[in-house]
Amino acid sequence: MPELPEVHTIVADLKKQLEKSRIIDVTIENSYKTYPGNAAFIEGLKNAVIEKIGRVGKNIVIKIHTGSYLTFHLAMTGRILLRTSNTTKDPWQRLEIALVRDRKTHYLRFCDMRMFGKASLLTGREAKALREKYGPDAVGDEISADEFLHSLKKKRTNIKNALLDQSILAGVGNIYANDALWLAKIHPATKTAVFTYKKVQTLLKCIQAILKEGILHRGSTLPDEAYVDIFGQPGKHQNYFRIYGKNNCPECKTKVVFTKINGRGTYFCPNCQK
DNA sequence: ATGTTTGTTCCGAT
DNA sequence: CATCGGAACAAACA
């Protein structure tokens, strides 16, 4: 689940809790695989001091004092939980990192039911390559409508698919893409080639509005609770979805169309989005 | 039992 | 040769 607002929330909370802390132990569960290999992962994190915690698209990126980067991608069902005790394991726990700050110990856990997620220890060079793989951040101020339009014009796909392409704009996932297109009154199957500057400007504003709202609500938690924050608490933005999972358009009450676009569930209002 | 799911990557087709 | 789109990855739930 986690898209930009969910990862943003996790990163913001982790910053408060863990910057300047020191890793004292790393435990990997049976048969779980980290990059570049469990032995190197554990060795590289031994006694590491957490210098900085940030986000690259939907990746959580933790810089340690050695110049390496501990990164997590949560994919569909990954969770980061921060516990104050390690007496009970969490469901689907794959990895636990014990950290100390101000003589207090925290247990950072990476849990992942479906195991599409990834825990990695990257070199400085690999971290740079990761950043370069991604386009400008969807809520950062480095993206201009001009640049966005230019990137879209180069593609021969539809706008819904383009929004999920992290190399064009980083951080948008399927749920927020549906809602942003509804807010912008754009049909999800619209070919990116026909976009005008004005339309792209509107879309960009709507994407940012939706994502920022998601951040204010501390992300979206669906009924399966795949996403919860680092304290195990659900987000609230699911109560503010516009079109995702809806039966009727909140604006005109027309029956929402549900279809698949590039294999992903797509909701739109046939009346408002043309 | 089959179809569905928040994401990404790889491979075959175009 | 570059780009696009579908399958695959794995697990739980309805």
Image: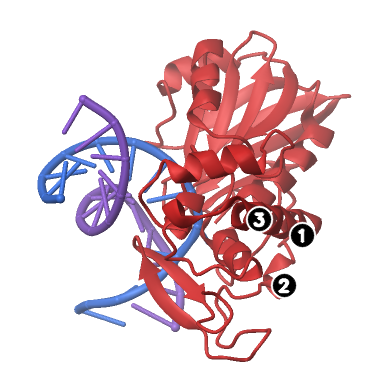
Chain colours: A red, B blue, C purple
Residue depicted at x 55% and y 84%: A271
Mark 3 = which residue?
A207
Q: Is residue A162 shown to the viewer in this render?
A: yes
Q: Are the residues tagged 2 and 1 within 8 Å (C-beta)?
A: yes
Disc number placed over residue A148 in the picture, else none: none
Is residue A105 rendered to the left or right of residue A261? right
Q: Depth-wise, is mark 2 or mark 3 nearer the camera?
A: 3
Q: Residues within 10 Å of mark 2 (few under 14, many from 20)?
A: some
- In what element is the residue under mark 1? helix
| Type of amino acid under label 2 | Tyr
Cα separation, mark 2 vs mark 1, equals 9 Å
Residue depicted at x 70% and y 60%: A210
Pinpoint residue A204: horizontal percent, then vertical percent. Answer: 65, 52
Mark 1 = which residue?
A213
Taking depth in this image into account, of A229 and A141 the one nearest to the observer is A141
| Type of amino acid under label 1 | Glu
Earlier sequence position, callout 2 versus callout 1: 1
Residue A171 figure quarter = top right
Residue depicted at x 55% and y 44%: A149
Task: Identify the subunit bearing mark 2.
Answer: A
Q: Are the residues tagged 2 and 3 within 8 Å (C-beta)?
A: no
Pinpoint residue A151: horizontal percent, then vertical percent. Answer: 50, 39
Is residue A120 rendered to the left or right of residue A216? left
Q: Residues within 10 Å of mark 3 (few under 14, many from 20)?
A: many
| Type of amino acid under label 3 | Ile
Q: Depth-wise, is mark 1 or mark 3 nearer the camera?
A: 3
Q: Is residue A57 shown to the viewer in this render?
A: no
Earlier sequence position, callout 2 versus callout 3: 3
Disc number placed over residue A240 in the picture, else none: 2
